[in-house]
Amino acid sequence: MTIAERESELIDEFSFYEDWMEKYEHIIELGKSLPLISEEHKKDENIIKGCQSTVWLHADLQDGKVIFTADADAIIAKGIIAMLVQVLSGNSPQNIIDAKLDFIKELGLQEHLSPTRSNGLVSMVKQMKMYALGFNMKA
C-alpha cells in the first residue's frame, strides 16, 4: 500500500467522527496499536527533540524499506506518532522523503492541537524524514 493510500485510509477513518473530542479519542486508540520500540532503543539519542512529551523513535532498514517503531510518555503524542508510523513505515526511504503528508492538513491536526503538540508533530515528521534521508544516502 502506498503512502497516499494509507493517508486516504486514515482520512476515511476520521471522517466517521463529528467533533474533535471523538477525534482525540480515536488518536488515543491509534496509540494503543503502535508498534512499540524495544526497551534497548529507549535511549536519549532516539528521543525526538522539539516534543513537549518524551517521544522515542527508532528506524531500521529492512529489504529496502524503513521500519519505524516508537513510544511516547503521553497518550496524545503516542497517538500522533502512531499515525505517522502507520502512514510511513514499510516504505522506501525515497518515498518517505517525498511524502507530502496531506492527511495532517486534511484532518486539521495542526489547528486542533495545542501549539506545543503541533510543534511536536512537525518535529516527528522531520525526524522520520531525516532517518529516511540517512538510509537513502547509505544506499
Image (cartoon, helix red, strand yellow):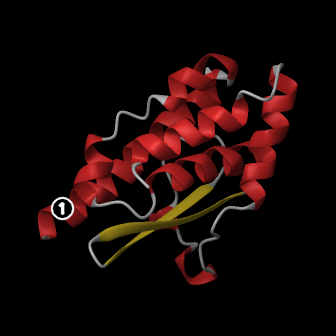
Q: Residue lying at the far bottom in this picture: please name it.
A: 40
Mark 1: secondary structure: helix
Specify the quadrant that holds the C terminus. Answer: bottom left
One can see residue 89 in this view: yes
Q: Residue lying at the far top in this picture: please name it.
A: 111
**Label 1 Cα crowd, 10 Å radius (few <14 / some 14-19 / many 20+):** some
Of residues 12 and 84, the one drawn nearer to the viewer in this rendering: 12
x then y, percent, for residue 62:
34, 78
Specify the quadrant that holds the N terminus. Answer: bottom left
Which residue is label 1 attached to?
Answer: 136
One can see residue 74 in this view: no
x then y, percent, for residue 48:
50, 52
x then y, percent, for residue 63:
29, 79
The residue that appears at 62% across and 53% down in the rendered structure is 82
The residue that appears at 51% across and 62% down in the rendered structure is 57
Q: Is residue 22 left or right of residue 106?
A: right
